[in-house]
């Protein structure tokens, strides 16, 4: 197969982790006989510095004509500490999600047998966890209007808004995911307080009879925050709005032992995008110490979701598992043993694939 992949390394550790994923993707191409074409484009603070826009039109063009986008991270401390900055790197990420129609962010949470002891949570609670969040990604309070300040600057407001169509397309994905998995769907909302949440619940209830093989449960987001770390194995597929999903998926990453391990796929109406759930980790940028595995696993999701190539995806997951078992890991996971560099982990994965 011929694959055109857009590379958006972005900020902080983005470029170094994307480099490792690209090495692995190339090794897969060689092993399975695929032709890979890469095109790199600017995003985030790097794009603001270069052209004054965190998601330039030229980058959007590159994404639109690609078959898949591999994305690193966005964000820079010089903007975090300056609330008055007019252009922010994160705006680029949100604009990219909106313009590419990426309404469904797939964030799986699973444990790695060799790492279960790394989680601060008890082994018997988390071992064998296998759940997936479908986070709505282009609506809700992240995008609602009006937003801003009153004239005096003494009040600020954001608007959470959802249409039935936005909820329905995400919910249908949830039902379809559940049908392919353990057939349990949890709708996460705050329907006891929020009007948008009541519309979510109503919409999911209306669709449920179309998927009689899926058991649906409805749970308030605060209760999910608690049950998620107490009984993660009791979940299968969770669907939720943008901000709840942002918060809960960070929480869920603790179950796997490290945020440096969790990949994601964003799917929607145009080119699909694959990115680690961690951020730009500026303190580690350029030091060759960041964990590349979340990005490498995002590349595995790319083979599965963008190209329908399960074997290629599995081959990546297998070598990642092997690296964890053998302790070929970066300092966040090395536990006093030798810590490998970001690039060394990438090279080791490639070597295994070439065997
Ligand atoms: C994420 C990130 C982003 C989000 C930020 C960087 C805007 O936290 O992808 O989860 O809130 O969506
Ligand atoms: Mn987040």
Image (cartoon, rainbow, N blue to C red):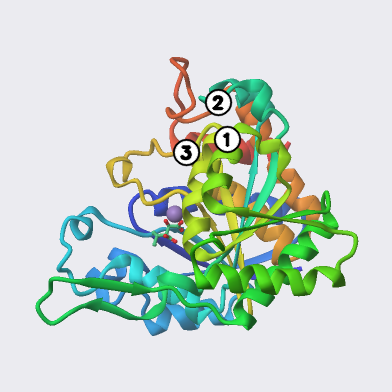
Which sits earlier in the primary sequence, circle 3 or circle 2? 2
Q: Quadrant of the N terminus?
A: bottom right
The image quadrant where one finds ligand 2 is: bottom left
Task: Specify the farthest residue to the left.
Answer: 152
Q: Is residue 69 in view from this perspective?
A: yes
Q: Is residue 263 above or below residue 291?
A: below
* Distance Cα–Cα, label 3 vs label 2: 21 Å
**Tag 3 secondary structure:** loop
Report how far apart the C-alphas of labels 1 and 3 lie in the structure.
23 Å
Q: Is residue 46 left or right of residue 306?
A: left
Q: Which residue is mark 1?
A: 229
What x and y, as percent, mark residue 181? 82, 52
Measure the C-alpha gap from mark 1 to mark 2. Answer: 8 Å
Which one is nearer the viewer's eye here, 319 or 114?
114
What residue is drawn where x is 62% and y is 30%? 323
Q: Secondary structure at mark 2?
A: loop
- Quadrant housing residue 44: bottom left
User: Residue drawn 85% across and 70% down?
Assistant: 209
The residue labelled by disc 2 is 121
Q: Are marks 3 and 2 in contact (CB under 8 Å)?
A: no
Picture disc at residue 291: 3
Residue 224 percent coordinates (x, y): 58, 46
What percent of the width, then of the height, locates residue 171? 69, 69
210 left or right of 281 in image: right
Looking at the image, which residue is at 89% across and 64% down? 212
Residue sitting farthest toward the front: 192
């Amino acid at each position: 197969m011929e694959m055109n992949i857009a590379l958006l390394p972005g900020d902080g550790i983005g470029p170094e982790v994307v480099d490792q994923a690209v090495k692995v993707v190339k090794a897969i191409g060689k092993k399975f006989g695929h032709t890979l074409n890469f095109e790199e484009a600017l995003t985030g603070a790097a794009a603001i510095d270069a052209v004054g826009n965190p998601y330039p039109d030229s980058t959007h063009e590159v994404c639109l004509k690609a078959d898949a986008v591999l994305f690193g991270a966005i964000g820079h401390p010089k903007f975090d500490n300056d609330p008055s900055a007019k252009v922010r790197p994160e705006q680029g990420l949100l604009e990219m999600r909106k313009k590419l129609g990426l309404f469904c962010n797939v964030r799986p949470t699973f444990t790695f047998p060799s790492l279960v002891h790394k989680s601060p949570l008890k082994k018997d609670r988390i071992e064998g966890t296998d759940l997936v969040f479908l986070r709505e990604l282009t609506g809700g309070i992240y995008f609602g209007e009006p937003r801003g300040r009153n004239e005096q600057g003494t009040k600020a407001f954001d608007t959470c808004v959802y249409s039935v169509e936005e909820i329905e397309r995400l919910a249908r994905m949830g039902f379809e995911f559940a049908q392919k998995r353990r057939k349990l769907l949890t709708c996460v909302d705050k329907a006891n307080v929020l009007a948008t949440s009541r519309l979510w619940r109503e919409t999911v209830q209306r669709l449920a009879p179309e998927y009689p093989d899926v058991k649906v449960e409805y749970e308030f987001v605060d209760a999910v925050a608690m049950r998620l770390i107490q009984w993660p194995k009791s979940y299968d597929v969770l669907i939720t709005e943008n901000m709840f999903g942002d918060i809960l998926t960070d929480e869920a990453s603790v179950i796997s032992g490290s945020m440096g391990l969790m990949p994601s796929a964003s799917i929607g109406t145009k080119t699909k995008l694959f990115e680690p759930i961690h951020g730009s980790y500026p303190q580690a940028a350029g030091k060759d110490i960041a964990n590349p595995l979340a990005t490498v696993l995002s590349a595995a999701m790319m083979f599965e979701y963008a190209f329908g190539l399960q074997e290629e995806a599995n081959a990546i997951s297998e070598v990642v598992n092997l690296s964890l078992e053998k302790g070929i890991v970066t300092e966040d996971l090395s536990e006093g043993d030798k810590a490998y560099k970001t690039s060394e982990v990438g090279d080791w994965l490639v070597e295994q694939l070439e065997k």
